Amino acid sequence: MPELIIEPGRAERQYWRDLWRYRELFYILAWRDISVRYKQTAIGVAWALIQPLLTMLIMTVVFGKVAGLPSDGDAPYSLMVFAAMLPWQFFSTSLSTASQSLVSNANLISKVYFPRMIVPAASVITSFVDFLISFLILVGMMAWFHFWPDWRILTLPLFMAMAFLAAVGPGLWITAMNVKYRDFRYVIPFVVQIGLYVSPVAYSSSVIRQRFGDVAFSVYSLNPMVGVIDGFRWAILGGEARIFWPGFLLSLVFVFLLLLVGVWHFRTTERSFADII
Amino acid sequence: MPPIIRVENLGKKYTLRHQGEGGGRYRRFSEELLDALKRPFRSLRRAPRSPLPAACSGLPAPRSLLPAPSEEFWALRNVSFEVQQGEVLGIIGRNGAGKSTLLKVLSRITEPSEGRVTLNGRVASLLEVGTGFHPELTGRENVFLNGAILGMSRVEIRRKFDAIVAFAEVEKFLDTPVKRYSSGMYVRLAFAVAAHLEPEILIVDEVLAVGDAAFQKKCLGKMGEVASAGRTVLFVSHNLIAVEHLCVRALLLQAGTLVADGSTASVLARYSAELETVTGIPVALRADREGSGEVRAIAVDVLSPAGGRIAFRCGDPIKFAVACRGMGTALHDLAIHLGIYLPNGLKLLHLSSSGHQQIDCRKDGRWEASCVLVKNYLAPGQYHVNVAILDGNRLVDRVESAAFFEVQAADFHGNGQLFGHDWGAIFLADQIWSVSESADTAP
């Protein structure tokens, strides 16, 4: 029979093992979020299709046609936008739901024990399902444009993982802050709104690089989504999108840095969640 | 065999921060930022002014002039006990005594500040019925969700699913979202999931305070079953009758410390004594009494006619026993008066022996007068008893709050419904209802 000892500071040592032990709760919370999401909606899952599709159309018209920004190589402008919409939508919805997750599950936190990291992690899964749905649109678009990907498409899961980590790091940090300071809920919509323009979603990042040079672009790459989006375009558009590897590496390093800070902050404040939520 | 639960010097400290205006529980980050900015200036501002004599004016001290006050508060301190496998342990105490904190520490929801707990078995805690139930999900889905939250595996839930549904009596509504359930169905389903947990240690908090009388009975039965199956149960409740019924042993917490640990009967007696110490001292030693003093009340007890108790159900008979003693002068034709009060001082009942029973007292005689309410019509709540001895119109002895007792919600009318706290009434009545159809003769 397993002996369990509870003392101050003890939870630290059992944490990661507990996280594994409670994986079933993780599945079921993720399943709950997914199945609740489209209950009592008129068109249900179609929302996951309409949102990115419309955004893509608007951006193509505004940035591609009106502003006349160039695409990556010969890739159609709308395809280039959509290759970025995929990770961007995933990132922004993940960040939003993760950062609200603890507060919206306050009743669980104050009544049952489990490693709290399960809650923000499970909430991200919903966005992943949306991602998979909108990936179908991408497949459709590629067929429409007769645009066939090459071997690089196989690296897509890696960039997906990077987008996941980029969302989880700040998400953990903000959801933990949100437990104590409720005004952090106002931060996220703002970050997401600004982020859409400072990330190369509607335009190609090579525009920035050509106009401002490599040094400025490296600073620009501190935005983790720059690396993720460039990676996505590189993998999806094949030879048409060039990637600036030093900038990408910088993004990658920064993602991990944010993740470490997020996990560290979450873990240090986690013990008091039940007392203050 | 080692104890299944061992608690050593357990303590839990909270830091209370007294906030300024709008002192809600959550801090706004902007407030904190503003505080940090203000701090250097605060000391400057304080220097020229002398602090207001707050105590004299009777006003609270202006908060901005005081250093950010924070206060340590021990919700639990130096609590040690052991529980053997198969024991059903009741934990009682007044509000704020630390019961819920103890359960939260034992179920790992919050970490202790000091001390150590060793658990030798799988723990399931039930601090609330239906934790995590989602209104949009169906009954079936919620069983799986709630089960997982309480620590059951999917395989385990699937195995017990039929039993859970049968226990809850909601077969027909399994695929209806629980937001359309009646509150009774909701609670039954939630408790049914919890009742089918099979942990070695079950921690239960107040969950029996829900549902109708019949379902409460079923829950109590299930708890008893769990206990007799050799599992260990920690049971926190205000429902002293349930504690008395289920637990062999009980703990009494008072202001965060463990003050009694022993057989349920002895701990409940101690609890009643604790309730009495609200005013401090046994009746015989009370100095705050009025009257000429030839005869004194030395003990006032509230009992059930069958045996000692301090908690009653609505409708139970209640016996008030007043022990008295002559203080050197013989008196004839005395009357004992009892007043039953709500905590807020409202007088509900006046019981008087005059006209019922003639009482004489020898000069140093000891005697006991008692009055039985055949059936109490009191709403659930706490009551206190004032006692007075009168000689004609002359007050001989009078003690306020000489005894306390509690009345708990019960199926007063015998119709399966609890008479609830939340109806706001203070008094019950026997009632007969009838409905008759009126002939519709209007043009």
Image: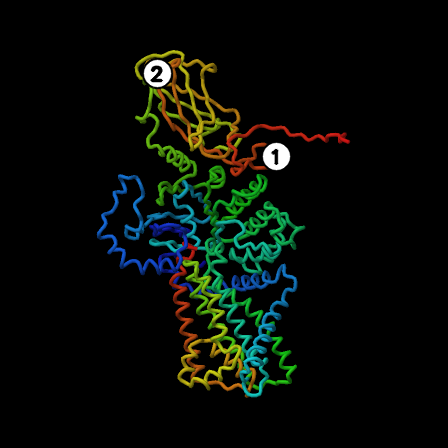
Q: Amino acid at mark 1?
A: Asn
The type of residue carrying mark 2 is Gly
Q: Which mark is residue B365?
A: 2
- With respect to residue B185, does A196 lie above or below? below
As measured in the structure, the alpha-carbon distance from the residue carrying label 2 to the one carrying label 1 is 48 Å
Crowding at label 1, few (<14), some or many (≥20) Cα neighbours within 10 Å? few
Q: What crowding class fits label 2: few (fewer than 14 Cα within 10 Å), some (14-19), or many (20 or more)? A: some
The one nearer the camera, B202 or B380, is: B380
Tell me which chain the residue with mark 1 is part of: B
Kindly identify the residue that appears in the image at 52 percent across and 45 percent down: B223
For marks 2 and 1 on the same chain, the one whose residue lies earlier in the sequence: 2
Snapshot quadrant of residue B293: top left
Residue A14 to residue B2: above or below: below
**Quadrant holding the C terminus of chain A:** bottom left
Q: Which residue is mark 1?
A: B415
Q: Is residue A83 left or right of residue A265?
A: right
- SS at badge 2: loop
The chain containing the residue under callout 2 comes to: B
Q: Please state the horizontal and vertical placement of residue B193, each as a whole percent of the image.
A: 56, 52
Apparent side of residue A212 relative to residue A156 in the rendered image (left or right): left
Residue drawn at the location 45% of the way across and 49% of the way down: B85
The figure's colour scheme reads: rainbow
Q: Quadrant of residue A184?
A: bottom left
Pick the quarter of the image with the N terminus of chain A: bottom left
Q: Position of residue A56 (x, y in %)?
A: 58, 75
User: Is disc 2 in contact with disc 1, using a CB cutoff of under 8 Å?
Assistant: no
